[in-house]
């Protein structure tokens, strides 16, 4: 066989091998998109309520694909948007428990209203699947401390501990907060004292709180009420006083 003939056969063989290889590769291209499920986020409402001091929004989803999941994203649509055009994307990271997760800064959710969150997973061949969207309701931040009103004393004056008569005083106050009252304390300084002491006030009817203190030595008892809401905003009443008399 001539050298020219041999080279021709070699070229034909290479071309046939290349064509068959491309055909085989074409048959193995993955056209099936990933499966995506289990979309969830936390908190489920009001990440901004109580700010500053609240948590970021954690978004998670599960995804699987025979060829492997290349990436996953959380897609977020702002209130008032009529379509997903211009939505925000947040890249998710695969965690050890099999979830893809991302923590979106709570400060991103600055507009009150209904936000929509969905997840997208894409495989190595560019096939993608999205979950259906879920709603996240955001209201304005609660930066308002509790309101303390109607602070009253059960008796003024009272008598010293060694006397006969009324020796204790009950301080009562109405405490309200839109997000909820966490605790209410009565702070007081005994007559002649230099340090403030505190006792918890108990809620006993509606928004009324009270605490009873005494007996004391004669002099002037000072006090104030301090309240904390569920977001740790605090409020303090004006300082009041109760006269503690010696025996007549």
Image (cartoon, rainbow, N blue to C red):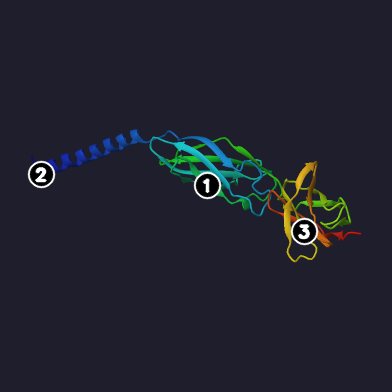
- Which disc, if any, is residue 102? 1
| Quarter of the image with the N terminus in it | top left
> In the image, residue 19 lies at what x, y percent?
27, 37
85 relative position to 91: left or right: right
Q: Which residue is mark 3?
A: 188
242 relative position to 110: left or right: right
| Quarter of the image with the C terminus in it | bottom right
Residue that appears at 19% across and 38% down: 13
Q: Nearer the viewer, residue 48 or 86?
A: 48
SS at mark 3? strand
SS at mark 2? helix
Q: CA distance from mark 1 to mark 3?
A: 48 Å
Q: CA distance from mark 3 to mark 2?
A: 111 Å
Is residue 144 something that shows in the picture?
no
> In the image, residue 145 lies at what x, y percent?
75, 53
Q: Is residue 240 above or below residue 142?
A: below
Q: Nearer the viewer, residue 212 or 101?
A: 212
Q: Earlier in the sequence, mark 1 or mark 2?
A: 2
Q: Residue furthest left?
A: 1
- Which disc, if any, is residue 3? 2
Residue that appears at 52% across and 47% down: 102
Q: Earlier in the sequence, mark 1 or mark 3?
A: 1
SS at mark 1? strand
Q: Nearer the viewer, mark 3 or mark 2?
A: 3
């Amino acid at each position: 066989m001539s050298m020219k003939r041999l080279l021709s056969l070699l070229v034909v063989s290479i071309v046939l091998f290349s064509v068959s290889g491309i055909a085989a590769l074409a048959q193995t291209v993955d056209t099936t998109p990933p499966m995506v499920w289990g979309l969830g986020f936390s908190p489920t409402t009001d990440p901004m309520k109580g700010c500053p001091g609240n948590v970021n929004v954690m978004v998670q989803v599960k995804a699987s694909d025979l060829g492997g999941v290349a990436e996953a994203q959380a897609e977020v649509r702002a209130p008032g948007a009529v379509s997903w055009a211009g939505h925000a994307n947040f890249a998710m990271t695969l965690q050890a428990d099999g979830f893809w997760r991302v923590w979106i800064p709570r400060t991103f959710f600055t507009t009150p209203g209904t936000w929509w969150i969905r997840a997208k997973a894409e495989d190595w061949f560019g096939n993608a699947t999205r979950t259906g969207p879920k709603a996240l309701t955001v209201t304005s931040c609660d930066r308002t401390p509790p309101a303390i009103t109607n602070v009253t004393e059960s008796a003024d004056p009272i008598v010293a501990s060694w006397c006969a008569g009324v020796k204790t005083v009950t301080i009562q106050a109405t405490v309200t907060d839109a997000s909820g009252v966490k605790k209410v304390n009565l702070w007081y300084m005994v007559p002649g004292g230099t340090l403030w002491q505190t006792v918890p006030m108990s809620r006993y009817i509606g928004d009324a709180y009270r605490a009873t203190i005494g007996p004391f030595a004669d002099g002037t008892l000072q006090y104030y009420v301090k309240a904390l809401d569920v977001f740790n905003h605090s409020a303090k009443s004006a300082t009041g006083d109760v006269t503690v008399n010696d025996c007549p």
